[in-house]
Image (cartoon, rainbow, N blue to C red):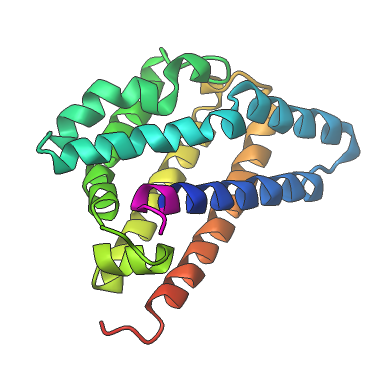
Amino acid sequence: MPSADALILARAELDLDAGIAHTRQLVRQNASPAFLAGAYEAVVNTTLASIHLKTRFRDDVTFLMELAHRVNGGDDPEVLARENLARAVHLKELALIAREKDPEFQPILDATRAHFALRLPDLARMVAVKSPASYSDLVREAFSHRAEVEGIVQANHDHVIWIVDHLEAHPHLLRLPHALVPRLAKTAREVLEWQTARVKRGVDEIYAGALE
């Protein structure tokens, strides 16, 4: 029987693959007019490659689960979030696509650190589940009421939307042609709404027939 950590990692990788595939599809759909299409698609593909999203993902999820286990061991989530934020967001790699030292970027780091601290205890509850029969069983064991999971999903959605809004309002923070920022923001919102709806459908399936 797989461990909670293994089930969480497997589900995260499935979600990542689905998200990347949908992003590439939307990029092709949103790539008009023709004179911007090549630049737009190149920017997205170069960004995905430069941050090594796929190759580093397993290590990233494993790292977050290690922090979650430390929360279960008594460590303070806020301290962990503060001490590990640069590693969690890959601040060095982020510098390739964003001006992370600009004063207008600091609110993103502050908001992400606060959100990180809030979500670590949720992940801690999940990694604490012993011998789950499946991912659905793991989620139901960690969160007996679906409203808790729905709240987490919505909070994650709102956090990402805030970041997208902030970057669109301050396009100089991104190291790419400013004319492409609105288009990228549109794609980011579309991917987020699609992924959030997908996750909510999964929550429906997990709690189908379960007592509230």
The percent position of residue 85, horizontal first and vertical second, equals 32, 25
The percent position of residue 165, horizontal first and vertical second, equals 47, 41
Q: Farthest residue toward the left?
A: 74
Of 146 and 115, the residue lying toward us: 146
The percent position of residue 43, horizontal first and vertical second, equals 72, 27
Where, quadrant-wise, is the N terminus in this rendering? bottom left
Q: Residue at x 25, y 73 (%)?
A: 145
Where, quadrant-wise, is the C terminus in this rendering? bottom left
Q: Farthest residue toward the front?
A: 1
Q: Is residue 9 above or below residue 174?
A: below
Of 33 and 55, the residue lying toward us: 55
Q: Farthest residue toward the right?
A: 34
Is residue 106 visible in the rendered image? The answer is: no
Which region of the structure is painted magenta? 1-7
Q: Residue at x 34, y 63 (%)?
A: 132
Left or right position of 26 against 10:
right
Of 54 and 78, the residue lying toward us: 54
Left or right position of 71 against 59:
left
The percent position of residue 34, horizontal first and vertical second, equals 90, 38
Q: Residue at x 52, y 65 (%)?
A: 197
Q: Is residue 104 above or below residue 21?
A: above
Q: Residue at x 38, y 46 (%)?
A: 159
Q: Is residue 200 above or below residue 80?
A: below
Q: Is residue 208 above or below residue 57?
A: below
Tell me which corner region of the image, top left, top right, bottom left or bottom right, holds residue 126: bottom left
Q: Can residue 99 be found in the magenta stretch?
A: no
